[in-house]
Amino acid sequence: MQGLAGVAACSTVSGTGAAAAPPRPYTPVFFNAAEWNFLLAACDRLIPADANGPGALALDVPRFIDQQMTTPYAQGAQWYMAAPFVQGPDNLGYQLPYPPRDLYRHGISGMNAHAATRHAKPFAALAPDVQDDLLRAAEGGRLVFGDVPSAAFFDQLLANVMEGAFSDPIHGGNTGLGGWAMVGFPGARADFMDWVDRYGVHYPLGSVSITGETA
């Protein structure tokens, strides 16, 4: 799998990984309680904490996603959203009538419905390995969410999780620049040209955010 397995390359996607740090106190502005519980659990499975660095919860990725849902991006303000919607090759572009915030509503509802049907519990209450199985099924397009392909929802979720972990903290995620520190990204330093051609050499100066915060 490209999505779940790709994230697993830098963090263990198993039930035996390091315990995730509890999320910081935050009241979601878009997601309801059931949706928020799903988001916390799913983010934790996509980037769990391990020896490589912090996980999605410590990086406040769910907060990042929730705050994005109030932006024009999440409302599809700059997307062409008129019918017809024709499923076909990727070069046709996005072919659903739902902007990101609606895609989350349909997708999370569908994931919780599948969890309840198969296991009599919502997604967040399932064991980690069972959550992983459902996420893999969604990624592979093997779940049915009405007219929303489960793979489209998974792709949206995974993209936003990665953005929340590795974007500038000014957007609500990557708390403490932990994502950047984990991969050695210098961030918004004004000048690091002296290091561009030093291949294989560890960059020693640490990460800096747009606001001047340092790791």
Image (spheres, rainbow, N blue to C red):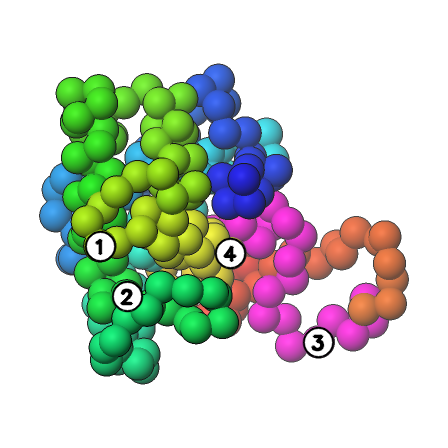
Give whichever of 70, 147 is nearer the camera: 147
Q: CA distance from mark 2 to mark 3?
A: 42 Å
Q: CA distance from mark 3 to mark 4?
A: 20 Å
Question: Quadrant where the N terminus lies?
Answer: top right
Counting other residues with Cα less than 10 Å from the Cα at mark 3, is it few (<14), some (14-19), or many (20 or more)? few
The residue identified by callout 2 is: 96
Residue range (magenta): 173-195
Query: Residue 154's x, y, as percent?
Result: 37, 48
The residue identified by callout 3 is: 191
Is residue 210 in view from this perspective?
A: yes
Residue 68, placed above or below residue 165: below
Which dot marks residue 147?
A: 1
Counting other residues with Cα less than 10 Å from the Cα at mark 4, is it few (<14), some (14-19), or many (20 or more)? many
Give whichever of 71, 168 is nearer the camera: 71
| Residue at 64%, 58% in the rendered image | 185
Quarter of the figure with residue 80: bottom left
